[in-house]
Amino acid sequence: MKARAAAPGGPAAPRAYETVVAWVEERILDGRLQVGDQLPAERDLAARLEVSRAVVREAVRSLQAQGVLAPSVGAGRAGGTRVSALPSGAMTRLLRLHVALAHFPLDEVVEVRTALERLSARLAATRATDADLALMRSHLEQMRTATDRKGFNDGDTAFHVGLARAAGNGLAADTTEAIREALRRPLMERFTALDEETYADLVQDLDREHETILEAVATHDPAAAEVLAEAHVRTAWRRLRGSAATMAP
Amino acid sequence: MKARAAAPGGPAAPRAYETVVAWVEERILDGRLQVGDQLPAERDLAARLEVSRAVVREAVRSLQAQGVLAPSVGAGRAGGTRVSALPSGAMTRLLRLHVALAHFPLDEVVEVRTALERLSARLAATRATDADLALMRSHLEQMRTATDRKGFNDGDTAFHVGLARAAGNGLAADTTEAIREALRRPLMERFTALDEETYADLVQDLDREHETILEAVATHDPAAAEVLAEAHVRTAWRRLRGSAATMAP
DNA sequence: CTCCCGGTAATGGTCTGACCATTGGAATGG
DNA sequence: CCATTCCAATGGTCAGACCATTACCGGGAG
């Protein structure tokens, strides 16, 4: 009689790597493991949990994909797998893939991004430092001096991520960044599909709107900033969303 | 002369499993792989990319953690690893861990949740079906008949997730759900720390607010719904955030 | 005493080869 | 035609080995 006997209606057979993931998660959730702490060596952990090193490695990869673990080779303090907190890359990849899989339609993503933009603008208007403002101003300049559409888009992304960072909300900033990155490809497709005149008009209007948002933030006017920012994202998307180059003939 | 020779200033040595992840991601991003498609068998993929099966498995775990791949045993159509789109669980775990790691302070998370709530309420007020409304009403009832605080909290979660689902925005709903789940533990700690009288008052007020939100949604009044929902989350958190049971003496 | 240098050990990274449990489907027999 | 049996393919797991990188320790040179 095997322990793993599959009870047909029962819970799916527990994978060995899940027990390792659970071991780590449990210690993170109750605080025994904190950022910077070192995990036992893979060989030790495998022995302790009575699994093979291969499944320990699978578990580590799984948690690494969430930005929670960071393995590094070598002996002593510097080596070993440590607990980290780098959700940005993880969120970006997750969102980009699921957008590509058409699980999240672009309109939905833009709706969320609009809501976040509003939040960021309001918070930034109350918290932004002079350094934040200077950085955002430099991004405005970057857009104005951009020589191609990709350059402009990069500046635009930097501006909005900068706004989110200035808001002092890490989750909002990381999410905004992830959404921007996830939308980069489809956005650029629409951007490059515009004819020269439409593009020039759009850039001019966007610059004006950026300017007014920055002004509201600089003068610490949260109410104005949130309205302007929300309207900005909304209208920009309205003008872009139609210009899709058909992708699947 | 090794191909992997570490160029000191160069980019970090590319891990073998990353090439496998890249292989899959590339095909998802350009549409060659879609939801439901089957990946080559691990052994085949390993041979094709000239890596060991172990690293292929690590890559699969990594993408599985993002909700993008779903392996299953067996032969024929049913077996094999397939492309999936289940970001909900992935987002939940990611957020929960990073909240536990104190990378995202509770106040920040609640701010984002407030923004999402506002969005969901507005959208729900324009799109909610009778079925959605009936479901939310049942969650209201669930809260009223709850015998303990956990039961109330579960109903509350269900109500707000239901609102997000009714909004018809999958990303907003999944994110709301992830945040709710990530906050469950710290929220319940505060919830249970309230004395009986404060708790009774709070529950009564929350119920009233839920009622007004649901009313605004039912009468298709987006402007009212978004204001009520935002105020609801904000005041609820204000009343709860102070009641923390100190955790680390 | 200090500094440099080599060795050593520990770590994650990778590979190989094997066996198991599950599952679908093909071959077989009624 | 249907039920049964067997087989092959799949992911899951394990054991053992070797490699590259890195810190640390100890000894020798200055």
Image (cartoon, coloured by chain):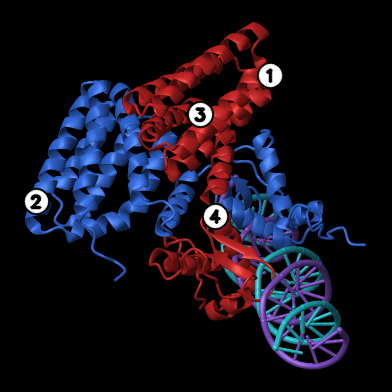
Chain colours: A red, B blue, C cyan, D purple
Distance Cα–Cα, label 1 vs label 2: 61 Å
Closer to the camera: disc 3 or disc 2? Answer: 2
What residue is disc 2 on?
B200
What chain is tagged by disc 4?
A: A
Q: Is residue A67 left or right of residue C5?
A: left
Q: Is residue A198 above or below residue A146?
A: above
Tell me whether marks 4 and 3 sit on the same chain.
Answer: yes
Amino acid of disc 2:
Ala
Q: Where residue B164 sits in the image (x, y, percent)?
A: 34, 35
Label 4: element kind: loop
Residue at 11% across, 59% down: B195
Amino acid of disc 1:
Pro
Q: Is residue B230 above or below residue A88?
A: above
What residue is disc 1 on?
A249
Crowd tier of the residue under label 4, counting other residues whose Cα lies within 10 Å: few below 14, some 14–19, many 20 or above = many
Tell me whether marks 3 and 2 sit on the same chain.
Answer: no
What residue is disc 4 on?
A67
Question: Quadrant location of the N terminus of chain B?
Answer: bottom right
